[in-house]
Image (cartoon, rainbow, N blue to C red):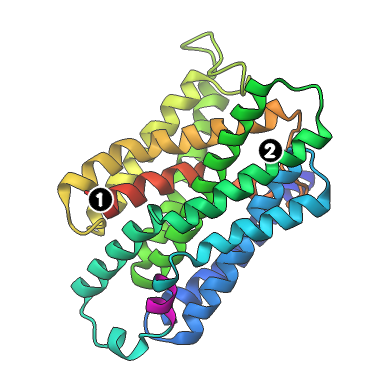
Amino acid sequence: MKLFKERILPAALFIVALASFMIPVAIWGKHYLAGRITSFIFTTLMCSIFAYEYFNANRMKKVYSIILAIFTSISIFTPIQNVNKLLINIENQKLFTTDEFQFFMTVLLRESILNWLSIVILLIVSLAFLIIELTNKTNMSSKDRIYRFFLTFMTLWFLTNACRFIQISLIFRWELALFICAAPSISDIGGFIGGKFLGKKLINKSFFPNISPKKTWEGFMFAIVFGWAFSISMILGLNLINSNLFAQIPAIILIPFAAVGGDLFFSYLKRINGIKDYSKILVGHGGLLDRFDSITFATMILCITYAFL
């Protein structure tokens, strides 16, 4: 009963809440203004929560965390011409063929990832983070401050682009959003099974002990194998990523590694800040960012292969 209340029930409620947004947007987002507006509202809210949990994990005052999170979420609306394309050009989009929608999505992703205004916003937020820490944390070297500045920028860049990709893919190709949300979870399940039943029986060493001592090499190998199996079935089975084999193969190979890397990266952020979870919003699971960590890096791999290969 304790396991159900603390682990299974919160996870189920989180999935239901996520599905209540994703399913309507996937059905109506492509051709209806209300669906796209909903996608912007939900994506902005989620991005704000992720950013807030990150800043709060760095032991900033709540008011600073909220302000910086709000400014971070503004980058979701850049470049502004993409917002116009998604919200205004409704009649023309209704006439698009499937291939034209695929091309439109590719252009949107390419413009969003490298958008200068979004990068400037995130640099300003990261600079504000640095200035706030200058006043609150006096026993830190200049080298550490610069390192934390770039660490913050890269974290926010990954988070915002991941949120943007999921939003755009829900509108134009919902199977991509389903895949990228499920693939890291499948890898996590594989890692749990491998670690639970074979942990340290084949390799008597921890996997990255300085970051996450409980992770094992057996769990890592199972995570990769499970991730590959799921990626092959989804990407090739549903012919995702523009039916481009030269993009599909790198995505299949790299996404499971990216999922593990995202998990380790955000675990590293927690460790250097001396916390266990990003928040307590999900009982037994930590914060929303604890659920989104592996998705972030995996999404960026899929986003890059989709937009540039």
Query: Is 107 drawn above or below residue 131 in the view shown?
Result: below
Q: Is residue 233 left or right of residue 183?
A: left
The answer to whether residue 83 is magenta is yes
Instruction: Specify start and end residues of the magenta stretch as a single range.
Output: 82-87
Name the residue located 47 percent from the left edge and 21 percent from the top edge.
218
Local SS, label 1:
helix
Query: Magenta stretch: dominant SS?
Result: helix
Residue 219 placement (x, y as % from top left): 50, 26
Name the residue located 82 percent from the left edge and 26 percent from the top edge.
138
Query: Is 300 drawn above or below residue 261 in the view shown?
Result: below
Occupied quadrant, residue 197: top right
Report if residue 303 is visible in the image. Answer: yes
Q: Is residue 263 left or right of residue 279?
A: left
Residue 123 placement (x, y as % from top left): 56, 46
Disc 2 designates what residue? Answer: 130
The answer to whether residue 264 is magenta is no
Using the image, tell me which numbered label, if any, was put on residue 40. Answer: none
Name the residue located 79 percent from the left edge and 42 percent from the top edge.
60
Name the residue located 32 percent from the left edge and 91 percent from the top edge.
91
Disc 1 designates what residue? Answer: 308
Residue 130 placement (x, y as % from top left): 68, 38
Whether tag 1 and tag 2 are in contact, CB under 8 A, the answer is no
